[in-house]
Amino acid sequence: MYASLLLLLLPLFGLRAQPDTLLQAYHWQEEGGERRLLLTPDATFQLDYGPGTEAGRYLMGRYRLDAAGRQLTLSVDYFLGKSRIHPRYRDGQDFYLVYDIVKVTERRLVLLDVLTDDLIAFLPTPLSGDDDPARRRIPKPKSKDWGLPEGWGG
């Protein structure tokens, strides 16, 4: 009885879901676009640009939230991002994409690009096993057993 009462009173004490857990709980699909953003618990991210992209489908790197949980920074190695990311985001040998988190709920994620003031809105989609970058490996083709044609002594 006390446990159920405590659960009912938790929202009054400000104990709600934290933004970082909401960010990691979903695969965020861009509204009106094909890009999908995945933030993992080990502070890595992948941005899927969808099939048929010329400069590479996946952009991967690390992310960081500020202490207040209101700013998201995506950092990408220079060699991984040079064909995909605009040079204005480059700082030294890496790219840093800094976003203010305007809104994060179970239904929507809205980010504001600090450099360009562009708003990007995402809708949540459920996570699946295919979303894990470590499990998404293309199997190597099996080698064929080559032999000599008939009449060639084989």
Image: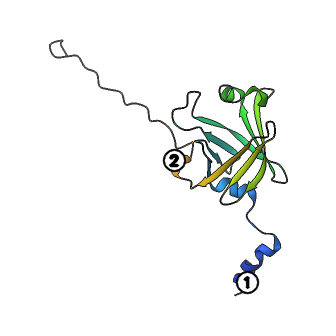
Above or below, 18 relative to 132:
below
Pointer 1 or 2: first along the chain: 1
- For the residue carrying disc 2, how many other residues have a C-alpha within 10 Å: few (<14), some (14-19), or many (20+)? few
Residue 135 locus on image (x, y percent): 52, 44
Is disc 1 placed on a helix, strand or loop? helix
Instruction: Tell me whether circle 1 and circle 2 mark residues in contact (CB < 8 Å).
Output: no
Marks counted in the figure total 2
Q: Which mark is residue 56?
A: none
Q: Return the residue at label 2.
A: 130
Residue 128 locus on image (x, y percent): 53, 52
Q: CA distance from mark 1 to mark 2?
A: 39 Å
Q: Depth check: give the residue in front, 42 or 85.
A: 85
**Looking at numbered disc 2 in the image, what kind of residue is underneath it?**
Asp
- Locate the C terminus by quadrant: top left
- For the residue carrying disc 1, how many other residues have a C-alpha within 10 Å: few (<14), some (14-19), or many (20+)? few
**Looking at numbered disc 1 in the image, what kind of residue is underneath it?**
Leu
Above or below, 140 relative to 72:
above
Q: What residue do we see at 55% from left, 38% from top? A: 50
Farthest left residue?
151
Residue 104 locus on image (x, y percent): 73, 56
Q: Which mark is residue 5?
A: 1
68 displayed left or right of 30: right
Farthest top residue?
152
Q: What residue do we see at 50% from left, 38% from top? A: 137
Is disc 2 placed on a helix, strand or loop? helix
Residue 15 locus on image (x, y percent): 78, 69
Above or below, 151 relative to 53:
above
Q: What residue do we see at 72% from left, 78% from top? A: 7
Asked which quadrant contains residue 116, the reply is top right
Above or below, 149 relative to 130:
above
